[in-house]
Amino acid sequence: MLLFLSFFLFGCQTNNFDIFNTHKFTNNSKEISSSFSFQNRNSKPPKYNSFSTKNAKTNIKKAILYHPTFKKSLASLAQRKSNIKQIKASKESQINFQALGGYAWVDENNELGLTGSVNYSKLLYDYGAVDQAVEAEKLKIKAAEFEVKSQAETIAFSAYQNWINLVSQQKILSIYKKGIKNAAPLVEKIDKISLSGIADSTLILRARKEYSETIVKMKQAEVIEKGLNEKFKDIFSLTKDYKIDALKPKNVKTLKYHSNLMIKNSPVLNAKRALIKSLEITKESLEAQKNPNLTLRAGVNAPADNPIQNGSANVGLLLNYIYDDGGKIDAQIENLENQISFSEIDYNNYLKDIKLELSVAHKAYIGAGETKNNLLELIKLSEDVRNNLNDQLAIGRAKLQDVLSAEVNLANNKILLLNTERDLLLNIYKIQYLSAGLFSNTKWY
């Protein structure tokens, strides 16, 4: 059962329209428009001159601005910003014009009549209910802004991943091609020796097997490289291939340093915090609605026939108090309390997951660095072995099969190094993505 108690604290009736001369009314409907325009925003694919370390951030920013997912997040933010103006409008002056025309039957005669009315209302005091609703909506806007930033960071990290993977795969393919080129003359000599019948067939078959396996791996590397190139072109909206330079590593500090930075800067965590605060203020706004509110109201009614003489006007204060709404507001408050509890659990779960993700990336970074140092030593030894075997081959103290095996082994170790360097670089950028952010100082909205 819904009961409303309304009281006119004071009021008056008058035939004089001068009561409205002391007020200036404006129509604020034109203000309800978005500060963003998306129809012509980034409609053409971005243009690039080159892909180097110096212009990496510029190129990736172009890709982000053109990405459809990012545009969608901006549109969502613009919609949220328009919502707050609707809430603010409830505190502004409200003016309503009405006109009624038609026939009236008076003293058995039909007469054509026309009447008009103007009504004005202005909320004066509501215990802060509307102000709190506005503040809650501002926090939702802030959360939407963090979501825009989060979307930009996610796209940026994906672009860096594609960049690093493609450059690494191109280098791997180059090593395979170079290794096969160096091994080809040795295989020809081995084939000639095989035909002569003066060599061990088992050793020759093993050498041919190693060479054939290297060719198969090169073909597989070519397929992977083509796929990575298509992904790279897709995220940057490219229509042709570009020469891509390698990215440089960034500084990485302790896990504790990056963890603290992540809690402070993570756009997802900030968005969740803003939403929780918004729910808490929305709850306060609902609680304020249980209190009385005071509204200034005025109106004018006048017929078309002699409006000055027959018209009337009124002005007064309306006190409105919801005595019993059947528990509607209490139910809404309870629902908000449940939402707050759920949001806090969601925040803590996400914080736990992202801390684990950062810890894994940091440990992988350290492990990749140690592996890289070991592989550099191994490659140096492999090069020494290959060079010694070439020297010994010239004086007849080494076999072609051994030289070929040394060449293949050196190529494999170099590929292991490239994969390790790729993992190292990927984890460096992931650590920055999770903690400080890849575009921490960029304003996207």
Image (cartoon, rainbow, N blue to C red):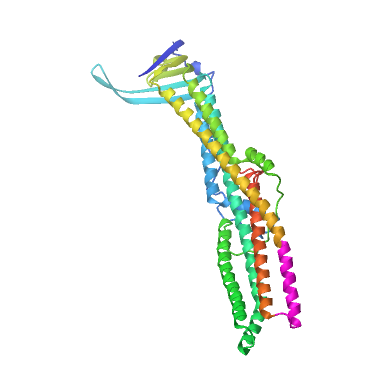
The answer to which quarter of the image holds residue 272 is top right
Coordinates of residue 46 in the picture (x, y in percent): 60, 56
Q: Residue at x 44, y 12 (%)?
A: 8
The answer to which quarter of the image holds residue 103 is top left
Q: Residue at x 62, y 68 (%)?
A: 173
Image quarter hosting the C terminus: top right
Q: Nearer the viewer, residue 128 or 150?
A: 150
Image quarter hosting the N terminus: top left
Can residue 93 be seen in the rendering of this structure? no
Q: Nearer the viewer, residue 115 or 34?
A: 34
Q: How many marks?
A: 0
Can residue 223 be seen in the rendering of this structure? yes
Residue 107 belongs to the span the image colors magenta: no
The answer to which quarter of the image holds residue 74 is top right
Q: What secondary structure is the magenta-colored segment mainly? A: helix
Residue 394 belongs to the span the image colors magenta: yes
Give the residues in magenta: 376-398
Q: Residue furthest bottom?
A: 196
| 106 up-or-down from 375: above or below | above
Coordinates of residue 361 in the picture (x, y in percent): 63, 49
Q: Nearer the viewer, residue 54 or 409?
A: 409
| Residue 398 placement, left or right of 310 | right
Coordinates of residue 183 in the picture (x, y in percent): 66, 77
Coordinates of residue 97 in the picture (x, y in percent): 43, 25
